[in-house]
Image (cartoon, helix red, strand yellow):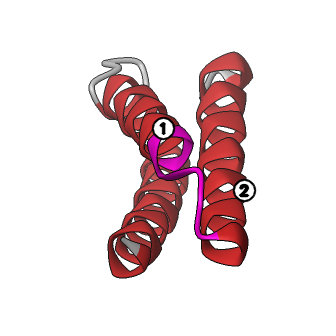
Amino acid sequence: MPLNHFEHVTEQLAQAKQAVERMQENQTGFAEAQQHVKIAEEALNELIHDPDLNSKTDQKEIQRASDLLRLIVETYQASN
C-alpha cells in the first residue's frame, strides 16, 4: 500500500477523533467535528476505491481504518 495514501487517511482519522473528543469535553465545536469526520470519510473512500490497494495486508489496513471511522462517527452521533 502506498504509505502516502494510508498516512493521509490515518492523519484525517486522528484529526476527526480529536475534534470529536474536544466536542465531547466542551460541548462545543460540533461544526468542526462534523467537518473533520466528513474529511476522514472522504479520504477513506478514496483509499477504498484505489485499484492499487488489493493485497490482503492492504485490505486489513483499510478494514481497520473503516472500523476506526465507524467508531468515531458513532461517538460523534451519540454526542450530538
Is 25 left, or right, of 5 in this rendering? right
Q: Which mark is residue 18?
A: 2
Q: Residue at x 42, y 50 (%)?
A: 59
Type of amino acid under label 1 = Ala
From the viewer's perspective, is residue 4 above or below residue 42? above
Nearest to N terminus: mark 1 or mark 2: 2
Q: Residues within 10 Å of mark 2 (few under 14, many from 20)?
A: some
Q: Position of residue 3 (x, y in %)?
A: 72, 25
Q: Residue at x 46, y 30 (%)?
A: 39
Q: Residue at x 38, y 64 (%)?
A: 73
> Viewer-proximal residue, 49 or 32?
32
Does the stretch in magenta take in 32?
yes
Q: Residue at x 45, y 28 (%)?
A: 43
Type of amino acid under label 2 = Gln
From the viewer's perspective, is residue 11 above or below residue 17? above
Circle 1 residue: 40
Q: Quadrant of the N terminus?
A: top right
Please identify the quarter of the rendering in which residue 8 is found. top right
The stretch of residues the image draws in magenta is 27-33
Is 11 left, or right, of 54 in this rendering? right
Separation of marks 1 and 2 at Cα, in angstroms: 12 Å
Is 34 left, or right, of 27 in this rendering? left
From the viewer's perspective, is residue 22 above or below residue 52? below
